[in-house]
Structures are given as structure tokens and as C-alpha cells.
Amino acid sequence: MGIVCGIAGAMLYVPFYRLGATSVPQTGTPVPPFTPVIDWARTDTMALAVAIALLLAEALLLLQMTRSRIFEELGPRLIQLRDRLFAATGGSF
């Protein structure tokens, strides 16, 4: 999502950047708008690397949580709490 927002921002806003009032002070020639050039090959590579890192981090976190003792203790208690809350609210929580 961040890569998509960055590309959209580049396409929408970069053409409006100004370097100064004129490109050549002696002649008064106006500065043409910038044209964003997106390196799609590197964008795809960066998106893939971020996705792999995110999935790996989530997998390691889940693995660590399932091996911890507190996860084994909290699991059944959270289910009991959910059931009590469901019964107390009549199923509308």
C-alpha cells in the first residue's frame, strides 16, 4: 500500500515542483514541470522484498508465541472470557 501511495504521489505532485522562478536568470525562461520516471523493475523488487520480510516476521512471531508457556495458559482463558461476554450480551458484542 505504501508503494502504491508513493507512486501516486510522485505522479500527482512532482510535476508541480518548481526549482525557481526561472531556469536561466538572464533570459527569464520558465522551468518546465518535472516528469516522474518510475523504475518499475526496482519497484517490483522492493515490494517483493518487503512482502517476504513481513511474512517471515509474522511467521517467526507466531512460532514464538505458540512455543511460549503463557500462550498455552491464556488460550483457554480467552475462550472462556469470549463465551462469558457472548452470554452476558446476548450475542451482540
Image (cartoon, helix red, strand yellow):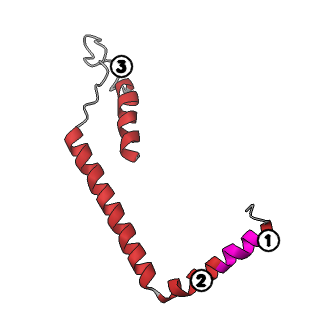
Q: Is residue 34 left or right of residue 9?
A: left
Name, please, the residue furthest toward the left.
41
First along the sequence among labels 2 and 1: 2
Q: Main secondary structure of the magenta part?
A: helix
Residue at position x 79%, y 65% in the image: 90
Tell me the distance, in whole angstroms, between the alpha carbons under discs 2 and 1: 18 Å
Residue at position x 30%, y 50% in the image: 47
- Mark 2 lies on a secondary structure that is helix
Asked if residue 81 is among those painted magenta in the image, a careful observer would answer yes
Residue 13 numbered tag: none
First along the sequence among labels 3 and 1: 3
Give the quarter of the image for residue 37: top left
Question: What residue would you read off at disc 2?
Answer: 76
Asked if residue 63 is among those painted magenta in the image, a careful observer would answer no
- Mark 1 lies on a secondary structure that is helix
Question: What residue would you read off at disc 3?
Answer: 21
Residue at position x 29%, y 60% in the image: 52
Residue 48 place in picture, x, y as percent: 27, 52
Residue 42 place in picture, x, y as percent: 21, 45
Q: Tag 3: residue type?
A: Ala
First along the sequence among labels 2 and 3: 3
The span shown in magenta is 80-88
Residue 91 place in picture, x, y as percent: 74, 64
Give the vertical position of 32 relative to 1 (above or below): above
Residue 71 place in picture, x, y as percent: 51, 83
Q: Nearer the viewer, mark 2 or mark 3?
A: 2
Nearest the camera: 40 or 32?
40
Question: What residue would you read off at disc 1?
Answer: 88
Tell me the distance, in whole angstroms, between the alpha carbons under discs 3 and 1: 68 Å
